[in-house]
Amino acid sequence: MAVAGTPLVCLHATAYSSRSFGALLDALDGKRHVIALDTPGYGESDALPIGGTIADYAEAIADMLPGRCDLFGYHTGVSIAVELALAHPARIGRMTFIGVPYFQALDFAAWRTKLAARHELGETLEQFEERWRFLVTDRPAGLSLERGFENFVDELKAWPDGWWAHEALFEHDLPERLAEVTQTVTVLNPAGHLAGPSRLAAGLMRNATVVELPELRGAVLDLHADVIAGHVLELAEVSA
């Protein structure tokens, strides 16, 4: 049965895919109409040309939006959501963010070097060892082996060009663009390296509220989907 209300479109982090929202979709099943999209070049989506900007990613996604909708952005998905809101204000309602990539509040150069590192496709498995350790061997406590492996596969699908969206992210003037957002924004703020930056980013927006969730940590979309879903449903009721 169709669920009434404004659709919620979810935008994922780089270099993963819409599978990041699998647990959240399950938690919201029958309660909210939720759509998770693959950013161009990730998951099952065709890539943009190299050098695409966050605005380019947003415009590609705009063609797939179901009329007027709310947005849920995670990391890179936050920046894309911001550009969608600014380019199509009549089509974008309430926005919910997790992990705002406000790296200007951290060591910007170091994070850019780490996340936007270039890769070349080689002939040996050694090129994937670091990502295997990070995503599978050293995955967050509580995350299943299967989900860690799915994240690894997502990165392999984008390899060696998975850095493209991160490069666009670091070229994007997020602080300036946040200041122009007029939509109502809720920043769900779990523990982690982006907790402080997310809090500061909320202060740059005209109509943003921070919900502190320090008890949530690690792979929050997988491990705490029920908590996040509860907040999503509360926000939907407020905007109804």
Image (cartoon, rainbow, N blue to C red):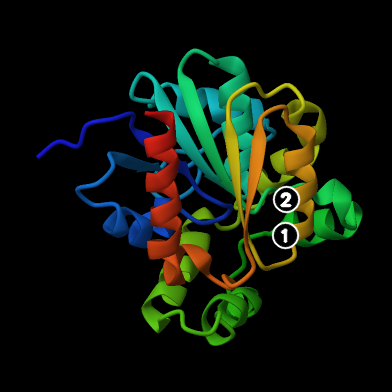
Q: Which residue is rendered at x = 67% and y = 59% of the image?
A: 120
115 over 79 or under it: above or below? below
The quadrant in which residue 144 appears is bottom left
Residue tagged by mark 1?
Answer: 195
Q: Is residue 66 shown above or below 118?
A: above
Residue pushed farthest top? 90
Q: Residue tagged by mark 2?
A: 198
Q: Position of residue 104 (x, y in %)?
A: 86, 47
Tag 2: amino acid: Ser
Q: Is residue 82 left or right of residue 109?
A: left
Camera-side residue of 122 and 208: 208
Quadrant of the image occupied by residue 24? bottom left
The residue closer to the viewer here, 182 or 170, is 182
Secondary structure beneath dot 1 equals: helix
Query: What label sits on residue 145 in the rendered view?
Result: none
> As drawn, is 76 to the left or to the right of 62?
right
The residue furthest left is: 1
The answer to whether marks 1 and 2 mark residues whose Cβ atoms lie closer than 8 Å is yes
Q: Position of residue 20 (x, y in %)?
A: 44, 58
Is 127 located above or below residue 64 in the figure?
below
Q: Name which residue lies at 59% across and 24% down.
A: 183
Instruction: Give coordinates of residue 181: x percent, y percent.
Output: 67, 24
Classed neighbour count for the residue bearing mark 1: other residues with Cα under 10 Å, few (<14), some (14–19), many (≥20): many
